[in-house]
Amino acid sequence: MATYTLRIDDRGREVLLQALSMVKNAAAEPLMQGDMSQENLQQHEELLQLHRGILYVRPDPEPEVEEPVVGPEAGINGGAGVDVKKPDWVPGVD
């Protein structure tokens, strides 16, 4: 079975939950009138599961922001223009 990822904001979640609630209520009507066909039961159960899944979902955690490096350890322009002394014993290094 394929799965999908959907990214929505808070307002989109509210709208989706309202729409699912209306469709779920409409799917419950035949059941309340006694039509317990397998198709109606399955459709209502799938809508319930989808509604619960969206209702219980939690927001993504905020991304961790790395603290900027300051001082002599900080790379300046990716190290461009920085004079780094290399050991004399490394062959092939000027």
Image (spheres, rainbow, N blue to C red):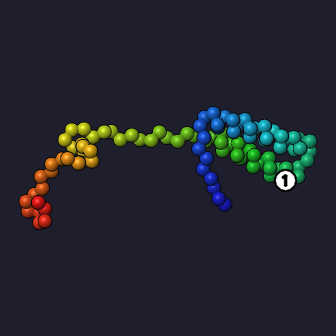
In which quadrant will I find the C terminus?
A: bottom left
Residue 16 image point, x, y percent = 69, 39
Task: Determine the image quadrant of residue 20.
Answer: top right
The residue shown at (83%, 50%) is 41
Are there few (<14), some (14-19), or many (20+) residues within 10 Å of tag 1? few
Locate residue 94 relative to residue 61 in the image: left or right: left
Q: Secondary structure at mark 1?
A: helix
Vertical relation: 88 (above or below) 15: below
Q: Is residue 23 left or right of residue 33?
A: left
Q: Badge 1 is on which residue?
A: 39
Residue 7, horizontal then vertical, whole percent: 59, 44
Specify whether 63 is left or right of 5. Answer: left
Identify which residue is drawn at 80% across, 52% down.
Answer: 42
Q: Nearer the viewer, residue 84 or 12?
A: 84
Is 10 on the left-hand or right-hand side of 81?
Answer: right
**Kind of residue indicated by mark 1:** Glu
Relative depth, front residue between 13 and 83: 83
